[in-house]
Amino acid sequence: MTWTNQKLSGRIPELDGIRGLAILLVLVLHYVVELGIPCVTRNWQFRTLLLFRLSWSGVDLFFVLSGFLIGGILLDAKYADNYYRTFYLRRFYRIVPLYALLILILVAGTLCVNHTAKPLTALFNWRIPFLAYAMFMQNVSMTLHGTYGCSWMGVTWSLAVEEQFYLLLPFVIRRLSHKGIMSFAIGMIVTAPVLRTILGHYGANGLAIYTLLPCRADALGCGLLVAIACRNQTVWTWLASHRRYVYAAFAVFGSGILIWILGDVSFGYTWMAGFYTSLLILAVVSPGRMERSIFRSFVLMRLGTVAYALYLFHPGILRLYHFFFFGKLPSIHDFPTFWVTLLSLCTVVLFAELSWMIFEKPLIRFARIRFQYVFAGHSTKALFFQPILADEDNPAPAAGKAVSPGAAAETEPVFAEDSPYSTTSTRVTISSRGRSAGQ
């Protein structure tokens, strides 16, 4: 019988906290660094802001987390009869509704904007075609046009990277053996920096290197590799019993990050991915007191829960507030601009909370109940589901029972679908090595 990692069968609250850290870094970048640096007048102010120069790497942490969590879902559901349908429908209900609202506001804003108001035309425009946004291809279009496009949709390049990854990875995991999947993950990690180097050598624009999936695949591959490791008994046992080596790796990567911050010496995206990968392992594999105290904090866990709406809407709301009060692009240079910036932040947090409670969570729950993985294939004999973060009132089905689409038990938790960046799935133990129909 295949080994089941009991650690993954229970709730891992530290993952919420890690996602909260990722969105916090993004908020620091857009609310503090980008608004503050152009307006500082004293050297100490500039040096203080430079301590947060790597807050852009919050997106890299999202990528590592996505590789781990989405990879985990697909590895656990590899032999499901309705593997593709269930995965893509759940992704649709999680990603598309709120994203469609974002695009709808873009359309309305573009139609209604006064083209003499420069801040509004920067916020709402069609420099990137509508079809690119609709197909999650805006990162490619941004590269071709040499611009992030309108400010309202600028941050969605990373969402496009992840959606393209979600489109590709299910086929890879379904069709390849476990060794093949591991080779694929390692290939992602190795190929991305090589490709970035080649593109940089031949003069490709920075947008291509920063926003295209093949160039950012190393972070996603690192997360996928951790997902594979956590489902291998030998590797998991070694990691749990040799945490000092993981701490050592974290210290080495962290030293490079410190040099990057203080000395402005870039170590590259792969180094950053390695840093966040070591952090993820520390949080998942027998977290210590420090990891628990940080990543189980209320603020980080709550930010992690509402991260999707926060990420999508915070740049646009920030710019709308500054245009309404000052008629210009956002900046922090006095107390009024500071208070308006703070007000916009409070507004987007409140919006994200309401979005989660009223809009996102009900859709997630509906999709989770309506579309469940079914393991009733020709050769799959016995199954044991252990949901991660499952509701107390909805325990996993008993061993040996397959799950029908209409079953009352919820085999995937709210956490599995509560952001586009993090998805964990049910643990599955299969008594037969045969493959189900359709593989």
Image (spheres, rainbow, N blue to C red):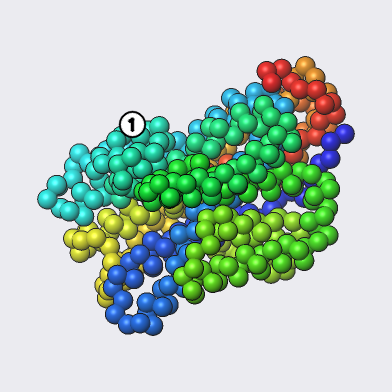
Residue at 66 percent of width and 32 percent of height: 173
Where, quadrant-wise, is the N terminus in this rendering? top right
Compare residues 185 and 148 and report the one nearer the observer: 185
Examine the rendered structure and indicate whether residue 208 appears above or below residue 438. Answer: below
Q: Whole-percent x and y of residue 303?
A: 52, 57
Q: In the image, is 241 to the left or to the right of 264? A: right
Q: In the image, is 43 to the left or to the right of 96? A: left
Residue at 50 percent of width and 41 percent of height: 214
Where, quadrant-wise, is the C terminus in this rendering? top right
Residue at 64 percent of width and 38 percent of height: 184
Amino acid type, mark 1? Leu
Compare residues 401 and 270 and report the one nearer the observer: 270
Examine the rendered structure and indicate whether residue 377 appears above or below residue 185. Answer: above
Classed neighbour count for the residue bearing mark 1: other residues with Cα under 10 Å, few (<14), some (14–19), many (≥20): few
* Residue 438 position by quadrant: top right
Compare residues 172 and 269 and report the one nearer the observer: 269
* Residue 244 position by quadrant: bottom right
Q: To which residue does mark 1 refer?
A: 131
